[in-house]
Image (cartoon, rainbow, N blue to C red):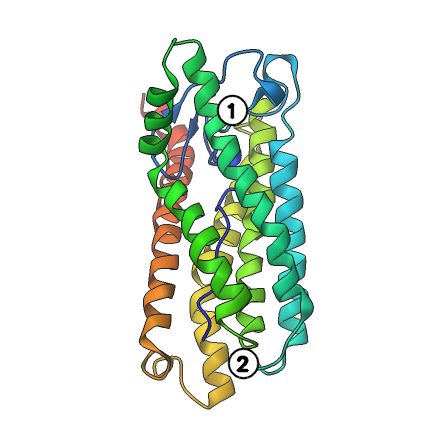
Amino acid sequence: MVGAFFTSPEGPMLGGLAPWQDVAVSVSPATSRPTPRTPRGAPWSVAVGVPPAIGGESDPSWLVSSVQAVLATGSGIVVIRSCNNVISDRHWLAREYVWFLIPYMIYDTYAMYLCEWYRARDQNRGHATTFRNFLSQNRLMITHHAVILFVLVPVAQRLRGHLGDFFVGCIFTAELSTPFVSLGRILIQLKQQHTLLYKVNGILTLATFLSCRILLFPFMYWAYGQQQGLSLIQVPFNIPFYCNVANAFLIAPQIYWFSLLCKKAARLFDVPEVKKEG
């Protein structure tokens, strides 16, 4: 089985705002700490989780994230449907879409740093201090991006040879939750946090994240087992050990981010009860 790769769970960290956030700050999945607004005048009003039109300028980050997510998910579905044999069947999108993903990941990393730089500008901090803060506050996400670019991209493009397009297609579908996160940001901008649409969107974000970022791994093991005549339980013992290790490293941050989303969802639905008790 081919250990495949994930893009950032919420699109760029520009889109790191959880869809149930009920205040005008974001909580980065990588740090779980509130992030202040970006100062006025930043290009595109770039900010971690700041919705469009802050400071009178539009923020296209949500659009970039959503477009990339739709393209990735669509490509993944095409690849999955085209591969009857999950090991040897091939589809050109499994390899070619990665070339589109590389500049997106670079943009994502640069956008994160740009957010930190504009926050630091008003505090008169030096470049060295700004860079250290950027690394310390985004350790998990930066590691995530670096592993994708310098480890998993070479694996997907070269080291796996001509095998495993099906699994690469499965991983592409992990982006399905991103448009719902972007919609959550738009609803926050419109101050619609307590509407039914906002809550439904939050539930859809949880459902798509769970199905396409966590349950995706058992599905890939199951699909491999069906091809080889193995049960789901038998698959981990009949594939190379490094594949299990790689998949464990990939699913671990997804579980962590999902736990953060669940906490925010619980907080949202607990708010009315707290008000009643008060």
| First-in-chain label (1 vs 2) | 1
Mark 2 surroundings within 10 Å by alpha-carbon count, few (fewer than 14), some (14 through 19), many (20 or more): some
42 or 70: nearer the viewer: 42
Tag 1–tag 2 contact (CB < 8 Å)? no
Label count reads: 2
Quarter of the picture holding the C terminus: top left
Give x and y (percent) for residue 110: 51, 33
Q: Which residue is at the far bottom?
A: 229
Q: Which residue is mark 1?
A: 47
Give x and y (percent) for residue 276: 37, 25
Query: CA gap, disc 1 to disc 2?
Result: 42 Å
| Residue at 53% in and 38% down | 108
Give x and y (percent) for residue 11: 54, 42
Mark 1 surroundings within 10 Å by alpha-carbon count, few (fewer than 14), some (14 through 19), many (20 or more): many
134 shown above or below 64: above
Amino acid on which disc 2 is placed: Ile
Amino acid on which disc 1 is placed: Ala
| Residue at 62% in and 64% down | 95
User: Under tag 2, what secondary structure?
Assistant: loop
228 or 19: nearer the viewer: 228
Give the numbered dot on residue 87: 2
